[in-house]
Amino acid sequence: MFNFNKNNKKEEEGLVIPLLPLRDVVVFPHMIAPLFVGREKSISALESAMKHGDGIFLAAQKSAQKDDPGEDDIYRVGTVGIIIQLLRLPDGTVKVLVEGKKRGVIESYVPNVDFYLVDVKELEDDDIVTVKAEALVRNVTETFEVYAKLNKKIHAEVVVTVSSIDSPAKLADVLASHLNIKVESKQKILEMIDVADRLEAIYELMLSEIEILQVEERIRKRVKKQMEKTQKDYYLNEQMRAIQKEMGEKDDFRSEVEELEQRLKKKKLSEEASEKVKHEIKKLKMMAPTSAEATVVRNYIDWLLDMPWFEKTENKYGLKESEKILEEDHYGLKKVKERILEYLAVQSLVKKNKGSILCLVGPPGVGKTSVAKSVARATNRKFVRFSLGGIRDEAEIRGHRRTYIGAMPGKITQLLKKAGSNNPVFCLDEIDKLSSDYRGDPTSALLEVLDPEQNYAFNDNYLEVDYDLSDVMFITTANVLETIPAPLQDRMEVIRIAGYTEQEKLNIAKKFLVTKQIEANGLIEYGVSFSDGALLTVIRRYTREAGVRNLEREIASICRKVAREIVTNGSNGQTRITSKSLQKQLGVPKFRHGEAEGKDEVGMAIGLAWTEAGGELLILETSITWGKSVLTLTGKLGDVMRESAQAALTYVRARAGDLGLSEDFYKETDIHIHVPEGAIPKDGPSAGIAIAVSIASAFLKRKVRGDLAMTGEITLRGRVLPVGGLKEKLLAAHRGNIKTVIIPKDNKKDLADIPPNVLKAIDIVLVDNVDEVLKVALFPGDDIKEDITYMEGDIGSTQEVRLNAQRREHGVSGTPRIHCN
């Protein structure tokens, strides 16, 4: 430790005393302050000052957060003070009472290990009383009296003490120590040597503090007044209740109104809805409790308060977790899953995502509705479903006006209330089965609901206030698009879900359907299992569908029979369902598999049709008899299909010479074209080339390949135009074990959506005109050999395939010989 002489002075350096750094406090001259000291260096400095008895230098730190401040972290101007009392506390800290004596400035730091030792130069105050100083003393003294009245922390004795101070310098220091100002402001005052400047700065600070204290006082009075009014109202209400209780009256109606008011205070509503509820409550108070209108108003207020105006569920899953959930719930459906994940990705990047409304279109049983449920699970949202099948009243969507007896909000509003959040996944099922009558058009009402640019202000006729639907994720489902009005289609993003392939059905059955039915029929404990062969047999020979609904029914039927067997005869431990045991469980197979629909025959061609249930094989038969050139079409054909038949016949007549027919081959013959399953309506242009092949085959007496199907629209010039629903048609051909399919060349782009296993199993032939179709479809005569190019397996590869010439059973030139019985 540095030893200094008795009077602690060096001739060259002035006063050398220990330094005590202060945190969040500035000690002025003439100020007595208690301090709590805990740092080791500071305690050592105090002990040294007490030992030598010649004072300590009190200087504030620039930053209170530093526990070990350096020389640059301490203000150079401080106060030379003395220690009045020092007390050690049990926790090791020291409580010290210090008194400031004079201003001082640190000239230099004297090297010392245990604590800071500084060479201090004392600063003398210029305490000459000038006119300016006298004026400032009076203003400051009067202002301090006002300040003391507003600041309850300053005692009256302090005001008396201040009034008795004659020295301007001392007055300034005493006042500065009592002001509730920041450390930086106090340090600035401490550093002011000129007394007049010091008094002026204190005067400005006091005026600023007085203004703040006056504002606080006004706020305090206003709050107190409001509290007094509230307490008064509460007191009067309690008195009123007590009087009613004494009189034996029960005011249930009043308590109901009060309950509604309390619910309004707690519930967060839109501004418009809040004002509406307040207005209705005010109106309700003036009504008789037993009036019918009071009941209507009460129900209306309940609906407004129960709606989820701002309640929403947060997505707790990341993109990968959501994708995993979608994969767990559904096999395949790649496009749907990609679109949902895109929506979630955008939602994570923007606060408000006005995403498009999805419309899932596909045959029954492919999982459209269950996909919507899966989306709700993947996004951690509530799920609600509204079946639109058969809805013909617009009020089902928008609600009834309150003027009607028994009026209710529309289903949209009802289901949102049921969901309890304003951002559920909302499934509008069977949107293609809406209808309309004299009560309105529901499809027109849905235009607002399904438009992201409008549904932020959906107005239900019952609620009469705008409700924001922009956070709702709408998913609609349909079997066909043709029955959905064009304006409604325009507001939705259509995603087509085609039928499943055989392999996809097998995977769905193994992963989902079998487990579900075993659990539903209580067979988990009995070791029931299905072989892959059994499932494939059910798919091939007991069902013929695009989806898996009938497949699930057949599996459920097997499980029920196994359950009966177990209950009747007991369990053998394990039950294995194989393809051999299926006939016992399900009976005789319902469908053929592994053979084409027909053999190689004359006048019969296989077309491909698209239906609501997926693709189907379409058999076309043509027969010619003696007659008067009459064309007969049967099989419940639509206008478009009839016109296609006429165009096909015209093409064959125009090409008679090239086909080896006489110019008047048709004049003494009647042509009958029939499409079996006559009870089922059929329409569309895509059977054009199949009809042309059937007619040409009948006249040429050349057989049509029985393992070949075709689709394409025909023109009078023989061009083959593209068709729709190619994926469903090729899946149907695959199910029917068709080996070759002829399609329009312009449909080549659609082959990208076809599953690879289907393309591998079927030879795809791309054609531009009917001449190419006839070369592939008809067996050549013994004098004809044809070379054709077609696509097999992967879309990118082509191979030359030479059809083996086979003998025709009948001649091909001249007018056909027709024998009538």
Image (spheres, rainbow, N blue to C red):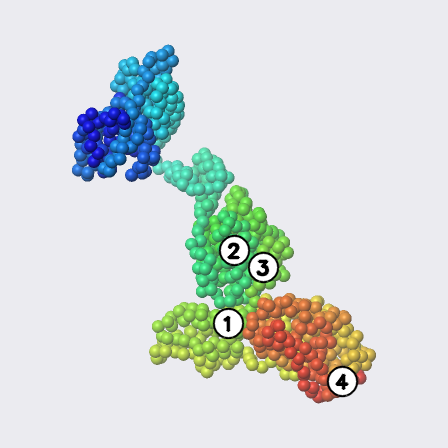
Label for residue 343? 2
| Mark 4 surroundings within 10 Å by alpha-carbon count, few (fewer than 14), some (14 through 19), many (20 or more) | some
- Earlier-in-chain disc, 3 versus 2: 2
Query: What residue would you read off at disc 1?
Result: 505
Q: What residue is rendered at 52% in x and 57% in y?
A: 342
The image quarter containing residue 140 is: top left
Q: CA distance from mark 1 to mark 4?
A: 46 Å
Query: Contact (CB < 8 A) between labels 3 and 1?
Result: no
Residue at x 64% of width, y 76% of height: 798
Q: Amino acid at mark 3?
A: Val
First in residue order: circle 4 vs circle 3: 3
- Quarter of the image containing the C terminus? bottom right
Rendered location of residue 176, percent (x, y):
32, 23
Three-letter code for the amino acid on which mark 4 is drawn: Val
- Rendering coords of residue 538 (x, y %): 49, 76
Q: Between disc 4 and disc 2, whose residue precedes?
A: 2
| Identity, as a three-letter code, of the amino acid under mark 2 | Tyr
Q: Is residue 430 above or below residue 541?
A: above
SS class, disc 1: helix
Q: Disc 4 to disc 3, how far (Cα)?
A: 49 Å
Residue 370 is left or right of residue 30, and the answer is right
Label 2 environment density (alpha carbons within 10 Å; few <14, some 14–19, many ≥20)? some
Is label 4 or label 2 in front?
Answer: 2
Measured in 3D between alpha carbons, the distance from the residue under mark 4 to the one under mark 2, in whole angstroms, is 61 Å
